[in-house]
Amino acid sequence: MATEEAIGPDSGGEDITRPIDDQIGAEVGGRDPMSSVAIREQLRDYIVANYLFGSGTVGDDVSLLDEGVLDSMGVLELVLFVEETFDVRIAEYDVVPENFDSIGAIASFIEVKWNDVRQALAS
């Protein structure tokens, strides 16, 4: 069940309510938040297309750094992709292997960021 929040006089002075999940959708590129599976698929498609040149596949828990899929420049490009595609702001201190070493870690990181936005909107 989505939490409701009153939205102020943006609608001609009338207060309306709309679910927080609708707002997070607006925060995430104007669409509903993706499922964990959809996030992972989009990340995998990007990594395969841009770092494996369209051939091969990468498992959710494969270390992108240890396997040589990403180097430091690749990590920076991936950070930009995540920011633009999933509409999250990534601080310098967030760019650590725990968040960007595997598709699973990146997907979990994105979900944490989205949950932070949900909590902020609900406050």
Image: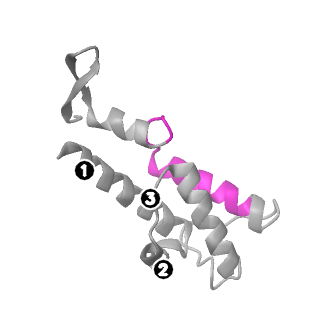
User: Tag 1 or tag 2, which sits nearer the N-term?
Assistant: 2
Whether residue 106 appears in this view of the structure is yes
Residue wearing tag 1: 120
Residue underneath mark 2: 96
32 w.r.t. 123: above or below: above
Q: Position of residue 115 (x, y in %)?
A: 31, 53
Tell me if mark 1 has few (under 14), some (14-19) or many (20+) residues whose alpha carbon lies within 10 angstroms of its own.
Answer: few
In the image, 106 versus 14, the foreground residue is: 14
Main SS of the magenta part reads helix
State the residue position of label 3. 110
Residue at image coords 28%, 14%: 12
Q: Are marks 2 and 3 in contact (CB under 8 Å)?
A: no
Q: Position of residue 23 (x, y in %)?
A: 34, 36
Amino acid type, mark 1: Ala
| N-term mark: 2 or 3 | 2
Q: Give the residue type that dot 3 points to.
A: Ile
Identified by mark 2, the residue type is Val
Residue 30 placement, left or right of 42: left
Per the rendering, the mark at residue 4 is none
